[in-house]
Amino acid sequence: MSDQIYQAPMVRRAAPNFRVIAMIVASAMLMENIDATVLATALPTMARDFGVGAPAMSIALTSYLLSLAIFIPASGRMADSFGSRTVFRSAIAVFVVGSILCALAPTLSFLVLARLLQGIGGAMMMPVGRLVLMRSVDRKDMVSAMSWLLVPALIGPIVGPPLGGFIVTYLDWRWIFYINVPIGIIGMIFVSIYIEEVKGKASGPFDTIGFILSGISLGSLLFGFEMSSHEGEGAFSIFLIAIGLLFGIGYLRHARKHPSPIMDFSLMKVPSFGTSVIAGSLTRITQGAQPFLLPLLFQIGFGLSAAAAGQIIIATALGALAMKPMAKFVFRRLGFRRSLILNGILGTIGYGLCAAFRPDWPMPLIFVVLVLSAFFLSFQFTAYNTIAYDEISKERMSSATSFYTTFQQLMLSLGICIGALALHGSMALSGTETPALGDFSAAFIVVTIISITATFWNLRFSPTAGEEITGYKAKQRKGAVAEG
């Protein structure tokens, strides 16, 4: 029965509505991204209501990360077993229920438990939402569809802080969670109408031991990377990272023997997927570090207010949004390989220019540099997110999406860690307790040097990679015939 469902000719039916499907998935992810950024703004007010210190509220953020780390690897198997539409719709429902419980929380302990539940929904929404899109969209529309998925990550950081400030100032912090309810309900209705049910083939018993080992490893690594950016948490951060690496090694040894591991590292042998994971991971070091380093640079290094710094950083979101309508055209003209090499170098060097920012620079020039840097790197991530699945069979698509999303989250957190370590290392060498402009320059240089090494991996893509998705090779052939 599951094979029959899997073979259903759904692509022809769903392809004309790929923008609708992409926006349904993007809207669910936008709800999740806004929730995270809004909450960060409201933590001091929530701390007063719960009668605890503001630092204690960080557990409300980290508990959510813990759920993500544990359940993202299992998302692909869940989608195969119960159907991608069912799991995606259920993930939205769990997120909404978790949001309601967060809003009703009488104590911090209750809030943490509710955030853990909310995180389960979020862990399923990210990879399964991408899986829904991959299974529902015709290959020729894949670039356009995947570019829509960048929208939540870009709009969330823009809308979140001012929305959080408005809610905390004029309403009650509990409305941060209540606003998810109507969005989630509408999302579940549209999922039921527009998205087909697709199940994967059974691939052996559920990897319970692998689920536990990967959960401990990823949870410890994510927490460790995140804690590295907190003052005075260096030793605890190192301890968590060590635990994560230890259990990660244990998982790798276990995965070699299990017939269907929870995270299938054999996917890395698929050329386009493995190269995209490695090159994308290196590039995401910069993407993860920038939201940490830029606000600190503008507030501490330039002496700007938080509001003024936020207005400048909006440039990164504007640049990335401007990319969306142009992605398909560029990939069709240049192909994936040349686009990845060119855009990767331009975008990474652009962010490397942040090392040269000084208070006497004209603000419009800083704004333009950030817009252009984000513009090029957005092409990069659209390309990585698309080309990764070019050679993945339908049977392995669910495993691939959960694997890719896991590494995506891990590398974003690692970017924060590396940015923080580079900043603190420069401060230690200069013997200062407060970061100076030179310390920020050193941190920007370190993360961009790491990311620029992705160029060597981008060179390993085939010149014809993604030709079916973009029509690049077909266009070249047509031109050759015309010349003949």
Image: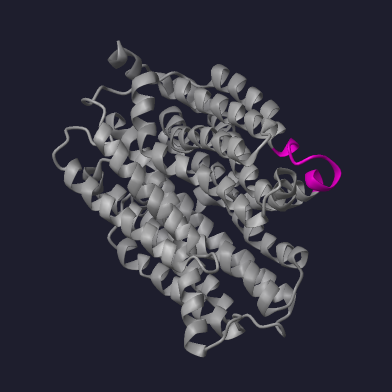
Residue displayed at 31% across by 30% down: 394
The correct choice, above or below, for 365 with respect to 285 in the image is: below
Residue displayed at 46% across by 31% down: 137
Is residue 396 at all visible to an observer of this figure? Answer: yes
Residue 167 colored in magenta in the image: yes
Choose between 215 and 29: the one closer to the eye: 215
- Where, by quadrant of the figure, is residue 175 drawn? top right
Which quadrant is the N terminus positioned in?
top left
Residue displayed at 63% across by 74% down: 297
Report the number of discs. Answer: 0
- Where, by quadrant of the figure, is residue 462 drawn? bottom left
Q: Which portion, as a residue range, is magenta? A: 166-176
**Residue 135 drawn at (x, y percent):** 41, 29
Residue displayed at 49% across by 65% down: 233
Choose between 92 and 331: the one closer to the eye: 92
**Residue 8 drawn at (x, y percent):** 36, 16
Choose between 55 and 197: the one closer to the eye: 55
Is residue 333 at all visible to an observer of this figure? Answer: no
Considering the whole magenta stretch, tell me its main secondary structure.
helix
Name the residue furthest left. 257
